[in-house]
Amino acid sequence: MTDITELTLEEKASLTSGADFWTTKAVDRLGVASIMMTDGPHGLRKQSGATDHLGLAGSVPATCFPPAVALASTWDAELAERVGGALGVESAIEDVAVILGPGINIKRSPLCGRNFEYLSEDPLVAGVLGSALVRGIQSKGVGASLKHFAANNQETDRMRASSDVDPRTLREIYLRAFERVVTGEQPWTVMCSYNRINGVYASEAPWLLTDVLRDEWGFEGLVVSDWGAVNDRVVGLPAGLDLEMPSSGGRTDAQLVAAVREQRLSEAALDLAASRVLDLVAKAGRRAEVAGPLDVDAHHALAREAAARAVVLLKNDGGLLPLRAGASLAVIGEFARTPRYQGAGSSLINPTRLDAALDALAADADVTFAPGFTLDGTGDAASLRADAVAAAAAADVAVVFLGLPAAEESEGYDRTHIDLPAVQLETLVAVRAANPNIVVVLSNGGVVALPFRDDVPAILEGWLLGQAGGTATADVLFGRVNPSGRLAETIPLRLEDNPSYGSFPGEFGHVRYGEGILVGYRGYDARGLDVAFPFGHGLSYTTFSYSDPSAVVTADGDVDVTVRLTNTGTVAGREVVQVYVGRDASAVQRAPRALAGFASVELAPGQSRSVTIRVERRDLAYWDVRIDRWVVEPGAYTFEVGASSRDLCGSVAVALEGDLVVLPISLNSTIGELADHPVAGAMARQILEVLDQAGDGAAEMMASVPIGRVATFPGMPITLEQVRELIDTANADLA
Ligand code: BGC
């Protein structure tokens, strides 16, 4: 590998920014190759011709796997890892060194235009599935780019807005998934986001890019800017930004060179960044040859498997589903013929093929199709509706495809509401009057309100399912695949119920994360709000029972939660067993329950199995802002086990040893705080005893009074001087 000392100052500067939209610069004289990094995340988007200035022109055909919103609904790391592996293979065949994904930002609001590209409102789901994707990609000798680091949870003003987040919320909600993936998988690259965090651009934040990412988490790879996220490269580089993408045409390289010459930037910082680029190029060079061409059929089959596993059966009253082969079906809705299968923006894949649900359904049933509405709202709505009603009236079952037209959600802007187009809802009402046996199939990247949920017997949430979504939907509708998808985000009754409502998307360049840690289901649960369908929900064509929950603390301090799961129905099926943790009393605000572990388990009819889920001690900790550390509180933890966050089938309590937190004390420490202190505790308890004798709750009242003040009160068993000495002794002991 080339040694950094062999490079001139100019070469080092040039190496740390792109050659064009997608590649790094070569240094021919030293044999340093140029490598390609390109989108991502749910398929390869490698531009076929010359790159245009926005990098959005046509790309080579690639398998469009289910976007993150759908893949996350599988809650299955093994499957996600296989999809990651396929992404790696496609990248390798096209000689792409790094694929730009996965995106693991938390879905703070259903309005975020890019939610289709993100996994979950929960950091554990996002972290576990994000890890699996990275593992899969990198197993093929291709690098992942974990994005967008960090707190990039909206598209509104995304290149400037400051996400104003308190430190505990940042750590527990918005950084936690990144931490899990970085520490567990060492992605080759991390992509810093466009936005500012508490006023500082992510691309210029030493705290984020160096202190946390490298010093705390041990990241060994390279930090690349999001495309165009560099504000001031001379500030960004020493903060930890190694590579600017895309090319700045040499402009910012010259700034770096000048800054080093004028001693405004240390050459050592530039050396570090350039050596990380050299490392990345070397890693990419070690990839074994992958023989093309792409096995289009095999990858399409995997896309179909993943899509069918992602479908969430929200409702199935009276067992309307699965459909009978040969049934007479009215298939209604333009989406059945013209699938909406991925989101818009930088992740737009040019699929190798595209399955429409209409064709797949027609292969197994007697189908009459009526578009029911147009996607852009043009056309004669009344006559389209009349045709749909006529088709429904003549059929056994009406399968109605509703969804968000592509223009309603995209990278680059947020939604302003979560409603389906009125024309579609009106068609549904009319069809229902003609035939109540309705199955609604939804295609949407972000959550939509479901005002009709009580009026139709069956609803299938299809999200955006990728290129094989049409056949996968038919697989589920006919029961060839028993649905096992689970909601990785809550479907609320109303947008106004969402915890971020009122502080999303902010104003004048700032968005205040006012709901703190109470994001998604944590917030709905804390406020006791009804929801349309809760986090973790999803039905099956079979039924499961849970019994005998138990828990043990392992030698490492983790908790193994075990439950017996039985398939009590008549068909094979897959259940996602979920473990939530809560505490009755805590020093810090807690959500009523937080996901602590999960497992996807397949059982034959009548089969019973004991399922053990490991809950990592680290996932039980809170971020203590007094000492900037993760802390596990001592005492009882309740583990609830069940099929969703609101379908809990059993619980078990475990007492844990806590982490010792000894804080420096001062005259401002209260008597109550000092009562358990190893050095000052005896004195504090003595004071409380004296007060206790006074009766009338004096001890309780005085518990919140600082020791410096109490000591000055008459009749106290200690003087201010003695308190000062005690403080010195206690703190000296600490040091
Ligand atoms: C997006 C990234 C993407 C990059 C390159 C940016 O606008 O935010 O997710 O990887 O463009 O296309």
Image (cartoon, rainbow, N blue to C red):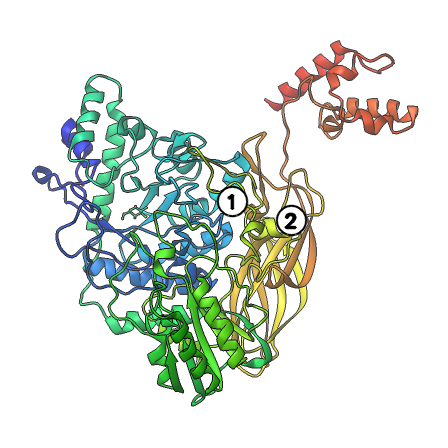
Residue 547: which quarter of the image? Answer: bottom right
The spot of residue 623 in percent (x, y) is: 56, 38
**Res. 560 mark:** none
Circle 1 or circle 2, nearest the eye: 2
Badge 1, how many Cα within 10 Å: few under 14, some, many 20+? Answer: many
Q: Is residue 629 above or below residue 282?
A: above
Q: Nearer the viewer, residue 506 or 231?
A: 506
Element at label 1: helix
Residue found 58% across the figure and 53% down from its top: 521
Residue on which disc 1 sits: 173
Badge 2, how many Cα within 10 Å: few under 14, some, many 20+? Answer: some
Image side of residue 222 versus residue 547, left or right:
left
Question: What is the residue that sits farthest to the bottom in this orientation?
Answer: 326
Disc nearer the start of the sequence (1/2): 1
The C terminus appears in which quarter of the rendering?
A: top right
The spot of residue 317 in percent (x, y) is: 59, 77
Residue on which disc 2 sits: 526
Element at label 2: helix
